[in-house]
């Protein structure tokens, strides 16, 4: 089930901005072996995707940010999960307890390797061989995270600061008053407040409603990389899919480029705040 290209890097090298974009859930490189192992159709598996988010970041990349984008589909491995966050009942032979950290997400079928889709039932015909799980971790999950970590360290060393913007999409919000954009900062733990504020103002200026941390406070990528005391910050960006997709939620909608512009403006606003010179201390 090997993906020929599990992820790719986009943007200038070196980046012109201290912001790195990650897109872990938009991969569409479904191998024949992966599709053959599934009891669900490809169209059903695509429900797991953050559909076309990889195509939304081009304006931010054009502005000077780097981006690391997954091509391996989320159905194969979820790059926004800890590598131990898996339902042990999915794997044969059963994993040693030291390799498993159970969570609400893994118990609900959305762990490291998704096992169920709401309304569709189990995804796979058979349990996953442990050797195949190990391959996916070694060839896709760890290299993806290593690439992000290396780039963030390089950005911090060059600019004195690095900021990860982890981009996702969420199901359409249906209730009145629900925010269209959610910024997740691990309840203040993954990024300095001033950069979240800069992102919020950029979203407001673009004409969208925005909230923090509810219902998405940031996943594994945000938690793993957000270390403000070390000069590395991380923020999760969730976008209502109905803002940029057509009614079928599969193809670009009329406001697709408006959302791409908004993401670019968020990146530029964060970068501008990060690169502001320190406030001069007034002479006594």
Image: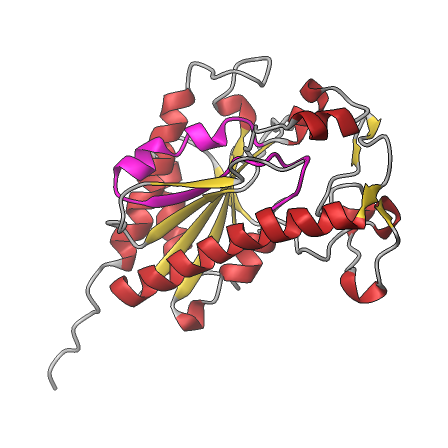
Give the quadrant of the C terminus: bottom left
Answer left or right for 68 relative to 114. Answer: left
Query: What colouring method underlies this structural image?
Result: secondary structure
Q: Residue at x 21, y 69 (%)?
A: 278
Residue 200 in the image, given as x and y percentages of width and height: 40, 45
Using the image, determine if residue 38 lies above or below residue 273.
Answer: above
Magenta stretch contains residue 60: yes
Q: Which residues are magenta?
A: 50-79
Q: Residue at x 57, y 18 (%)?
A: 250
**Which sits in the foreground, 156 or 6?**
6
> In screen coordinates, is 248 left or right of 59?
right
Q: Is residue 164 visible?
A: yes
The residue depicted at 47 percent of the width and 22 percent of the height is 244
Q: Is residue 247 above or below residue 87?
A: above
Where 26 falls versus 217 (above or below)? above
Residue 123 place in picture, x, y as percent: 80, 31
Q: Does 74 appear above or below 257?
A: below
């Amino acid at each position: 089930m090997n993906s020929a290209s599990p992820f790719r890097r986009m943007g200038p090298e070196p980046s012109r901005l201290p912001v790195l974009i990650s897109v872990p859930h938009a991969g569409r490189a479904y191998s024949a072996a992966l599709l053959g192992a599934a009891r669900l159709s490809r169209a059903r598996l695509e429900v797991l995707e953050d559909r076309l988010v990889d195509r939304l970041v081009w304006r931010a990349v054009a502005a000077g940010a780097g981006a690391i984008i997954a091509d391996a589909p989320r159905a194969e491995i979820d790059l926004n999960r800890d590598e131990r966050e898996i339902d042990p009942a999915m794997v044969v032979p059963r994993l040693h307890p030291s390799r498993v950290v159970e969570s609400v997400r893994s118990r609900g079928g959305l762990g490291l390797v998704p096992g169920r889709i709401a309304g569709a039932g189990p995804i796979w015909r058979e349990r996953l061989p442990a050797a195949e799980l190990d391959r996916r971790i070694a060839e896709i999950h760890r290299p993806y995270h290593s690439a992000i970590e290396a780039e963030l360290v390089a950005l911090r060393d060059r600019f004195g600061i690095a900021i990860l913007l982890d981009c996702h999409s969420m199901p359409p919000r249906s209730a009145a008053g629900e925010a269209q954009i959610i910024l997740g900062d691990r309840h203040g733990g993954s990024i300095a407040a001033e950069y979240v504020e800069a992102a919020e103002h950029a979203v407001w200026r673009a004409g969208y409603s925005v909230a923090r941390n509810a219902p998405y406070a940031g996943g594994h990528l945000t938690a793993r990389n957000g270390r403000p005391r070390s000069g590395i910050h991380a923020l999760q960006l969730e976008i209502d899919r109905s803002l940029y997709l057509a009614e079928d939620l599969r193809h670009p909608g009329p406001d697709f480029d408006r959302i791409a512009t908004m993401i670019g403006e968020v990146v530029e606003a964060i970068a501008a705040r990060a690169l502001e010179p320190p406030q001069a201390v007034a002479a006594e």
